[in-house]
Image (spheres, helix red, strand yellow):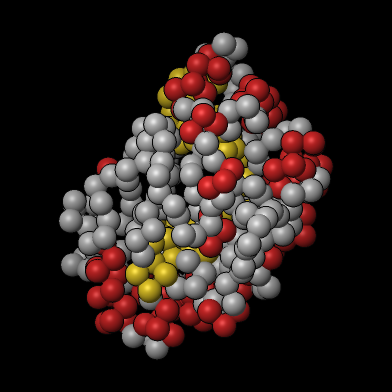
Amino acid sequence: MSDKLKDKYSRTYKYLRVSVTDRCNFRCKYCIPTHDFEFIPHSKILKYEDIIFAVDSFSKLGIEKIRLTGGEPLVRKNISFLISEIGKIKGIKETTLTTNGSLLGKFATDIFDAGIRRINISLDSLKQDRYEYITGGFKLDDIIEGINQAINVGLSPIKINVVAIKTFNDDEILDFCDFAAKNKLNVRFIEFMPIGNKIEWRKEHIITGEEILKIISKKYSYEPVKKAKFEGPAVNYMLSNGAKIGIITPISNHFCSECDKLRLTADGKLRPCLLSDKEINLFDEIKNRDFDKFKEKIRESLKLKELDHNITNEGCDTQFKRTMSKIGG
């Protein structure tokens, strides 16, 4: 296909993350700061019809996988309608969703019926006091109930995303490995990134993928697992207790050369790299249903993509303009 999206380094893009809202019922400390925070005005948020046009346009350019994110995507009214409509678009082979899990008890059946099969759930602690602290007061039991409901309706695989933070939850790494085995879940440990609330990020809080594996090896042996189709940047392992875990290392071991991902924000900005503030505004082209101009701007955005991001575990001087909730993760 001549319209396939390629950057100047010959990387092909097949995966689009779509943020449907910057709203979230949580106030996670590394995502939404509690000070001086403003949501995007509703008039600036893409409507479902806009998102459907954008996804259809991206599909014509080679995008095959869509992940719906937020904020928290399940707080947006009638999200199942959007899921169902995206599933009808020719060329889109899979639609997935990332959630904090708090509303799965209510919506797991609806999103399954609409076409979602795989979900990612953010869960950074298995201890109630820590979970309340990191999320701004939410109950861990409610999230576990939501996970169980997702399992019961047939969502599979369910991936649990754990942002590993030294001195906060690094003593729970083995607990998460046991949790994965007991519940037949895939747990992915993600290095702490300096995006969102920079005040809460310190380089000394990073626990690297290598360090995570060393902790796991104290109790379990592990073997690498080959990636399945559409899987992301995680390096996966099967542990001797039967758990499948993944390690995502955006800081200590860049996977930029394998990147096939673009991000569309809830206000219509295209962000070629999570760890860069460079973005292109597609809002007018989407609203005007101008596919030719839309395509031109997409190709323009790929010129902004660097070979690698410049963030390392030695530190970061970048002051990101957007919180993670406004980017979509």
How many circles with numbers are drawn on the protein?
A: 0
Residue 99, horizontal then vertical, whole percent: 63, 53
- Relative image position of residue 117 (x, y in whole percent): 58, 53
What is the x, y in percent for residue 140?
Answer: 78, 42
Query: Residue 80: in sight, yes or no?
Result: no
Instruction: Identify the residue shown where x is 61% and y is 73%.
Output: 81
Residue farthest toward the bottom in the current orientation of the protein? 288
| Residue 54 or residue 327, whichever sits in front | 327
- The residue at 28%/74% (across/down) is 297
The answer to which of 287 and 1 lies nearer the viewer is 287
| Location of residue 5 with respect to 51 vertically, above or below | above
Describe residue 76's horizontal placement relative to residue 191 as left or right: right
141 or 283: nearer the eye? 283
For image coordinates 63% across by 27% down, the residue present is 167
Residue 176 or 66: which is nearer the viewer? 176
Say whether residue 144 is left or right of residue 68. right
| Image quarter of residue 23 | bottom right
Query: Picture coordinates of residue 208 (x, y %)?
Result: 47, 27
In the rendered view, would you say 304 is above or below 43? above
